[in-house]
Amino acid sequence: MKLFTSVFVALFCVLLLFGCNTFSPGGTIFSTPSSPYIYKSTVISPKTVRISDLLKENEVFFEMEIPAGKTLVLKFLKNQGDDSIYAPDLMKYGIFANAEASGDLENAMSVPGSASRLIDVFIRNDFEARESDEPRLLRSDELLEQDYYINKFNKQDEQ
């Protein structure tokens, strides 16, 4: 029984450390140069990420305006691209809600090697409203503006 418990604890620790694709801006305990790059966009700090190829006169091959309340995750996989000379690496990326930055990176594209790509991050000048995934409850003063209540009161007055 003791052996079973220790094996179970060891397996649980391995799955906890390596089995989940959870992304956070500070990285994980075992962050390496091949760890994912995380860019979090907020209402007061909306970000744009642009990646350019230094060998092709700074030609931009990827640009994304990250919506407020979302996180962009980039992961570069060495020597897994389509073209072994001009695009030897594979970039996997995904957009997640800021509170739920975990899951699989479903999008991918071949990119230049690490020595010839430049990642620029810009903070946009304008504030932007965050898109909410959940319906918001109306305040009491907003309830009075709804047609239901106005029509209900008008019908009572007419009678």
Image: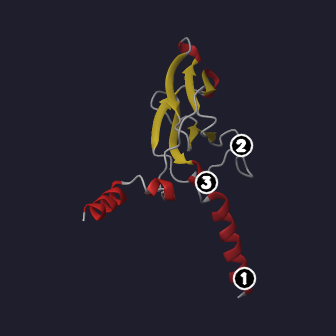
Vertical side of 150 occupied by 52: above or below: above
Colouring method of the image: secondary structure
Q: Name the residue under label 2.
A: 32
> Residue at (59%, 58%) from the top-left corner?
20
Q: Which of 112 and 134 is in front in this view?
A: 134
Q: Dot 3 corresponds to which residue? A: 22
Tell me if label 1 and label 3 are in contact, CB under 8 Å: no
The amino acid marked with disc number 2 is: Thr
Earlier-in-chain disc, 1 versus 2:
1
Foreground mark, 1 or 2, reads: 2
Distance in Å between CA atoms under marks 1 and 2: 33 Å
Q: Which of 134 and 61 is in front in this view?
A: 134
Judged left or right of residue 6, residue 121 is left
Q: Say which residue appears at 67% left-offset and 59% top-offset.
A: 17
Q: Which quadrant would residue 55 be assigned to in this image?
A: top right
- Camera sees residue 87: no
Q: In this view, does 136 lie above or below 54?
A: below
Quadrant hosting residue 89: top right
> Looking at numbered disc 1 in the image, what kind of residue is underneath it?
Leu
- N-terminal of the pair, mark 2 or mark 3, is 3
Residue 97 location (% of width, % of height): 54, 49
Mark nearer the viewer, 1 or 3 = 3
Query: Between marks 1 and 3, how big is the CA–CA gap?
Result: 30 Å
**Label 2 CA crowd tier, 10 Å (few <14, some 14–19, many 20+):** few
Count of numbered circles on the image: 3
Q: Residues within 10 Å of mark 1 (few under 14, many from 20)?
A: few
Disc on the earlier residue, 1 or 3: 1
Mark identifier at residue 3: 1
Describe the element under mark 1 as helix, strand or loop.
Answer: helix
SS under mark 3: loop
